[in-house]
Image: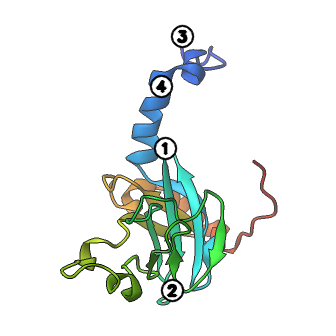
């Protein structure tokens, strides 16, 4: 590495090393807050979006109470993905396409599934596991591990820098994959 101010690029290993990728997956995607898009993607009650964050797939859902929630995107019945990454829908329930288990928009198991099982089945532990999620100036942030400090602390001085720009009024003009 060249002295500060003289280098132009990171060393090749920063882009190709499996060890660097694993570090980034663990420290940047799993253990911190990650911006996963705009609140506009899930603005109406029932709006749902599947997304990938590092190695994980998550599901955003706007509840009937207008609260945005995030869950691990895995059905508790047979571990099937509920929505593919990038897929969006609007429904009053979260539905598994494999065996049809359904969940309320708050992640709890739907009553129809609860009553279809053997006596003694306890549905309280079968809801979708939540993931920390928070909206900030029109952006959605998630923290998969739950280990990051509060979003306001993590954002730090960015709050004061962003405020004059009213980023909550921005709209996506185009996207590319």
Q: Nearer the viewer, residue 84 or 146?
A: 84
Q: Say above or below: 40 vs 3.
A: below
Residue under pointer 3: 1
Task: Decide: few, some or many residues near mark 2? Use Cα within 10 Å; few <14, some 14-19, many ≥20.
Answer: some
Q: Residue furthest front?
A: 118
x and y percentages locating residue 88 in the rendered image: 65, 69
Residue under pointer 2: 66
Mark nearest the camera among 4 and 1 is 1
x and y percentages locating residue 161 in the rendered image: 57, 59
Which quadrant would the N terminus be assigned to in this image?
A: top right
Q: CA distance from mark 1 to mark 2?
A: 28 Å
Q: Nearer the viewer, residue 2 or 130?
A: 130
Residue under pointer 1: 55
Mark nearest the camera among 1 and 2 is 1
Q: CA distance from mark 2 to mark 4?
A: 39 Å
**146 sits left or right of 140 in the view:** left
x and y percentages locating residue 29 in the rendered image: 46, 45
Residue under pointer 4: 20
Disc 1 or 3, which lies upstream in sequence? 3
Task: Decide: few, some or many residues near mark 3? Use Cα within 10 Å; few <14, some 14-19, many ≥20.
Answer: few
* Residue 138 visible: no
Q: CA distance from mark 4 to mark 1?
A: 14 Å
x and y percentages locating residue 21 in the rendered image: 50, 29
Disc 1 or 2, which lies upstream in sequence? 1
Mark nearest the camera among 1 and 3 is 1
């Amino acid at each position: 590495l060249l002295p500060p101010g003289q280098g132009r690029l990171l060393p090749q290993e920063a882009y190709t090393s499996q060890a660097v990728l694993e570090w980034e997956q663990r420290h940047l995607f799993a253990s911190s807050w990650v911006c996963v898009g705009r609140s506009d993607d899930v603005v109406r009650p029932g709006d749902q979006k599947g997304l990938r964050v590092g190695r994980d797939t998550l599901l955003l859902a706007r509840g009937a109470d207008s609260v945005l929630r995030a869950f691990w995107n895995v059905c508790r019945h047979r571990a099937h993905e509920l929505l593919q990454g990038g897929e969006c829908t609007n429904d009053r329930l979260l539905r598994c396409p494999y065996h049809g288990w359904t969940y309320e928009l708050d992640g709890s198991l739907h009553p129809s599934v609860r009553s279809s099982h053997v006596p003694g089945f306890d549905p309280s532990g079968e809801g979708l596991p939540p993931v920390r999620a928070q909206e900030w100036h029109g952006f959605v942030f998630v923290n998969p591990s739950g280990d990051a400090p509060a979003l306001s602390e993590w954002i730090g001085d960015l709050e004061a820098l962003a405020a004059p720009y009213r980023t909550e009024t921005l709209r996506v003009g185009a996207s590319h994959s």
